[in-house]
Image: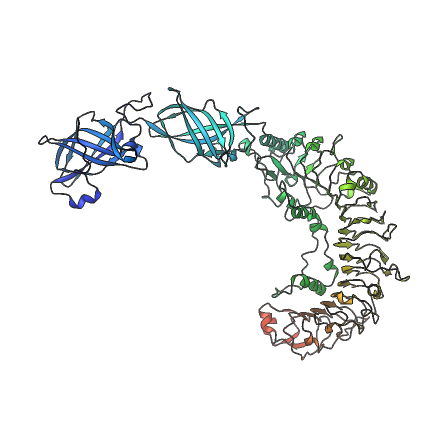
Amino acid sequence: MLFTLGFTVGSCSDDDDAVLQAGYGYAQFKLYKSCLAETKVTRASTNELNYLRDAQKMKIVLINQEDGTEVVQTVGLEAMGDDSEFGLRSEKLQLMAGTYQIVGFYLYKADGTTQDLKQILSGEPDEKTIITVINGGLAVQDIHVKVVKRGMVKFTVTKNFLPSTRAALGEDYLFSDIKYINVTVQEQFTKKDTTFSNVAVEYTEKLDGNGTKISVAVSDSIFRLSAGKYKVKNYTTIKKNKGSLEYGEVNGADFEVSDNVTTEVKIPVNFSKTTGSIKDYLVLKEIWEALGGPAIPEKNQKGWRYSGVTYPLGTNWNFDKDIDLWGDQPGVELDAKGRVVGLSIGAFAPEGDIPESLGDLTELRTLSLGNHSDQVGDNIIEETMGLELTEAQKNSVRSDFYNKFVKNDIALYFSEPIQAALKWQKEGIPTTFSPSVVNDKASRPSLKDVPANRLTNGIHKIPVTIGNLKNLQYLYIANGKFEGFEEGTDLGKLENLTDLEIYNCPSMKKLPEELQQLPNLQSFNLASNPNLGDFHEDLGEFVASENISKTLQIFYLTFNNLTVLPDMSMVKKLGKLDCAYNKIKTIEKAFGRDVNLVQLSMDHNLIEELPRDENGSFCGYADVESFSFAYNKLKKFPNIFSSQSVYVMSSVNFSFNEIDGFEGEEDGTFKGVNANTIAIGGNKLKKFPTILFKTNSQVSALGLNGNGIEEIPKGTFSASKYSYMMKTLDLTYNKLSKLPDDFNGRNMPFLYGVDVSNNRFTEVPTGPMDAATLTVYAVRSQRDENGNRLLRKWPSNISLCPSLRQFCIGGNDLRKITDTISSYIIVFEIKDNPNISLNLSNVCNMIKAGAYLLIYDPEQDIRGCDYVK
């Protein structure tokens, strides 16, 4: 049958309902794929569509059953849902009410850029088909069209682990690196290949039906294939930048495509168990099993339970997942290729001997078998392990032990008001206060993480294969049963190992000789090993060894039982040395000028004198931050410094010794000191150390508290050309009853903080108030030798101090104060003045606002401010 195509005759849209002519109705046709038996061909015949979606127009041929009139009309087609392959729907066709027989139809599509319609199929119903159109109604008729049967496929990339060599060549990579995939499938009857290129996939982790954690890469794209049986032939995995990762061939990945059904096709990508990352993960499991990781109740094995602060308490490792996910464990750090670069297991309570396979973790950079931060504070070692650290980050890691457990801020050797003065000079004067004490004691050293001889793990032996870890940079061994390295261990190949910690290992009775082999050791923490005994001879051999003497820069020997500090003059790069809390009586030899110590802490020992080299030097002072010999038995302040030095030391601390004078004071050879802060409190200096000023020592903060000093000679401050540098002076707990006339703002124009508390003044000394910069002034608890209160008079000129912000006059016997309390003073201490009476109305609003800190006793007679009651 041949008909002329008409584009608009009788057709209409939904909007035509309002103009439907009387005696007419609508007809609509729905096109579906014909339900014929499956065919083995995949190409459409001459009267068969490739895709139903190709049809854009339909010409329908009808015969009016009442008068035999032929009706030929053309209507547009649209999808009935999201996918046209599930059916097309025609526009509504306006017809005169009546009965019609469908005798045929033609389907058309636009041809190229001209948009001319091209016939793509002609057909007729398989059986007589009648449609009845009623007046004002809608008749719907299904029409079945011969279309090649097709289904949908969706690709999911899975993993196929091979026991040894890869089946395909390619670089080691992570499964999560796969961003795209090319996949070729083959129809098994025709052997025709179909390739889908650059299929985007997204990595995801989930639990399978058995509760095992797996990972897959899923494509959201839907592709169509002719119905039939297929197999996955090959694939190419592709990374983010579209570069190929690997080509692989596939066996056994068969699937079947059914008409209009979505089939998930799994693409098994080959991974070898001998690739670097998976090999690492097998080692992790071996270590876990060897050190009691699994919980085995029948063997009374509790399994690992994390007790630190970085991960949830009680956490254990989990291997109930795909093997390539085994590296995802707490305490394990991986690089971009999935290789193990960081391993910290000390806080999991491991028990036993580490297996030899440890040496197969060839990319390992940080190994922590326990460390000083296992159970306290933030564990910077776990937080930074495996990373390429900047110099600042590396210094933070190296200083972590010192800062947490050893560092003793020199400000803490001064009185509380002076501590505030030192803090305010650095940070500025506070604007608000909480109801707390003036000073902040948060900087005091905390308790040690793990007390000596208390264990958090039971790691015993470390295999000789540790010598294979050529990329190892940081090694921590702590809080376990480590006795020493196994016989035959060679550490000489660990050229990248710069930082070592052997901390709190009570089973270690001798310093391991193997440590001398380390070719580039820079930082060594050997603290808290008292069971080493007095190991100064072994220590001397260690520091004098060829490698160590050339590379060592930081050495922590805190909390041990050394009685002698051996010669370290050959360790020219040594910058930080901490030997606090030992029993050192003797320092064998001076370090010498060439050893410029940045930090030296010899606190809490039994040292009586310091050795000198042939030049009279103890060490170099080019970059001293802290130089501390507090709590020793020195009798004299050592003459090892010079006020003429071009280098200014940050702090020098000789507090709490038995110092009663200065070396070289009597014969005039004392050279003075050039340091910002000097603390020599808690000694036996009965005389004020005028020698510091006579030698033009350059000091800005001086602590002389607790010495029993009775007098400051007149002319002390006018005699020095550097008196103007003095800013802060602690004279508490002495026996002073007056200050010399030259203790004033003319000689010390930048005076910031002065504390003369716990002396014998009957009046507040006015000399310090002459300094326009005086900010903190304390004159507390003035007593005579019998403990009687001496100070009763309020200083009438206190309001004339323009910069005074803290005034402490508690512990005296002040009476009625008639002066108006200055609102410039924001910290005012008057507690323990039982007879005081004063009016605070001038500062009451500031007190209420938290901008004024009043330190007082509730029973005191304070008027004008009910807020303080």
Residue 273 relative to residue 664: left or right: left
Quadrant of res 413? bottom right
For the question of whether residue 439 can be seen, the reply is no
Quadrant of res 283? top right
Q: 157 and 351: which one is in front? A: 157
**Quadrant of the rendering where the C terminus is positioned:** bottom right
Q: Residue furthest left?
A: 67
- Residue at image position (25%, 34%) is 116
Residue 486 relative to residue 45: left or right: right
Q: 770 and 529: which one is in front? A: 770
**Quadrant of the rendering where the N terminus is positioned:** top left
Relative image position of residue 618 (x, y in whole percent): 83, 51
Relative image position of residue 454 (x, y in whole percent): 71, 43
Q: Is residue 553 above or below residue 43?
A: below
Q: Residue furthest front?
A: 114
For the question of whether residue 482 can be seen, the reply is yes
Total number of numbered discs in the rendering: 0
Q: Residue furthest right?
A: 667
Relative image position of residue 108 (x, y in whole percent): 25, 31
* Coloring basis for residues: rainbow
Relative image position of residue 645 (x, y in whole percent): 80, 57
Q: Is residue 477 above or below residue 69?
A: below
